[in-house]
Amino acid sequence: MAGNHSDLEKRLWDAADELRANSKLKSSEYSVPVLGLIFLRFADNKFAGVEKELAAQSGERRRTISKTDYLARGVYLPESARFKRLLELPEGANIGKEINDAMKAIEDDNPDLKGVLPRTYNRLENSTLVELLKTMNRIPADMEGDAFGKIYEYFLGKFSMSEGQKGGEFFTPTSVVKLIVAILEPFHGKILDQACGSGGMFVQSAEFVKEHQRQTTELSIYGQEKTAETVRLCKMNLAVYGLDGDNVLCRSVPSEMRSCVSAHLRFVLRRGAECLFGGLASEAEIEPKRVIRPLRENEKAPEFPGLFFGAERLGAVPPRGFEPLYRD
């Protein structure tokens, strides 16, 4: 089954990348809308599964199914946001507007997703959107969260590679993340990632917990990023895995997270100082004495400051980071 998923990931990427190559869009302009459609396909699959489950229960209990029943199971999709409806829009329809409206409708009915989903589909040509919808429709209707997560992760890695250094701001290679998580052993407690990117550290921490037959509800996730777009990528990624992204915030200074992590913190995940702000940060942006500023050439790294609030364990990526690595 893993092999089949790998083949599917590659086929989906090849099709999506060919569409980008035939458009006038840069990878950075194309990545968020594509990831949003992967999320939409995931939400549609999940909604359909919940719909069947509730229908069976309703038959047994003879009661009406409400929107609250769906939200209690993680997602509610209004008819206007169903993937099949978008796929079958008539020729001449404004596809970009229809998808934007679908994303807004999902946010309106799912408070946890408010402000998270992309609404820039009007920037893509109708023909490109039609083909993208057809591409995402290749994802099996019975595919569930973790498998979708692998597809989302695969696309993140590919977009990271195509965007070069900028891509490294939101994606750390999965192999690196898994190693850090395996060393930290975050079985339970609060986890803070001060430059969380697309949320890979959180996802792999949850996967680690599941592999050891524990509940992911034992983890409390706290993260921050400098740009709102990266925060949205992270929250979509967490939602696919069924993880709570409410405490992933857009913050420009790492110490601002202090007010969010009020009780004992068990784990801190971080990258080097220059990565802390998504690229080299100016010293004016960084609160002195509390944050490691970007190192000058040949300068020795200072001791870790009190920013980590006495966390039990710290996992870090080296200051210069890693070149983006990903499988084909």
Image (tube, rainbow, N blue to C red):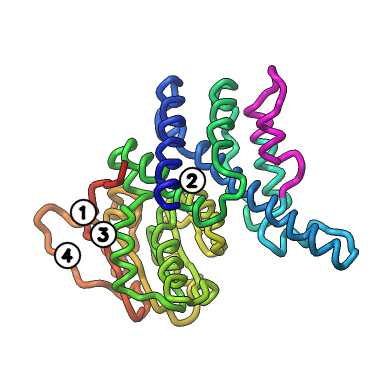
Instruction: Identify the residue shown where x is 59% and y is 22%.
Output: 126
* Closer to the eye: label 4 or 1: 1
**Coordinates of residue 58 in the picture (x, y in percent):** 84, 62
Up the image or down, 246 lies above or below 211; here it is above
In this orientation, which residue lies closer to the viewer: 123 or 134?
134
- Image side of residue 37 versus residue 104, left or right: left
Total marks placed: 4
Mark 1, secondary structure of its residue: loop
Q: Are marks 2 and 4 in contact (CB under 8 Å)?
A: no
- Residue under numbered circle 1: 320
Q: Measure how far apart labels 3 and 4 are at the Cα level.
A: 10 Å
- Residue under numbered circle 4: 301
Q: Measure how far apart labels 4 and 1 are at the Cα level.
A: 12 Å
Which label was assigned to residue 229? 2
* Closer to the eye: label 3 or 4: 3
Q: Measure how far apart labels 2 and 3 are at the Cα level.
A: 21 Å
Q: Which residues are magenta?
A: 77-99
As for residue 221 lying within the magenta part, the answer is: no
Up the image or down, 273 lies above or below 97; here it is below
Q: Are marks 4 and 1 in contact (CB under 8 Å)?
A: no
In this orientation, which residue lies closer to the viewer: 220 or 328?
328
Q: Are marks 1 and 3 in contact (CB under 8 Å)?
A: yes
Mark 1 nearby-residue class (10 Å; few <14, some 14–19, many ≥20): few
Instruction: Identify the residue shown where x is 56% and y is 61%.
Output: 242
Residue type at tag 4: Ala
Mark 4, secondary structure of its residue: loop
Which label was assigned to residue 272? 3
Up the image or down, 24 lies above or below 292; here it is above
- First in sequence, mark 1 or 3: give its number: 3
**Coordinates of residue 146 in the picture (x, y in percent):** 50, 57
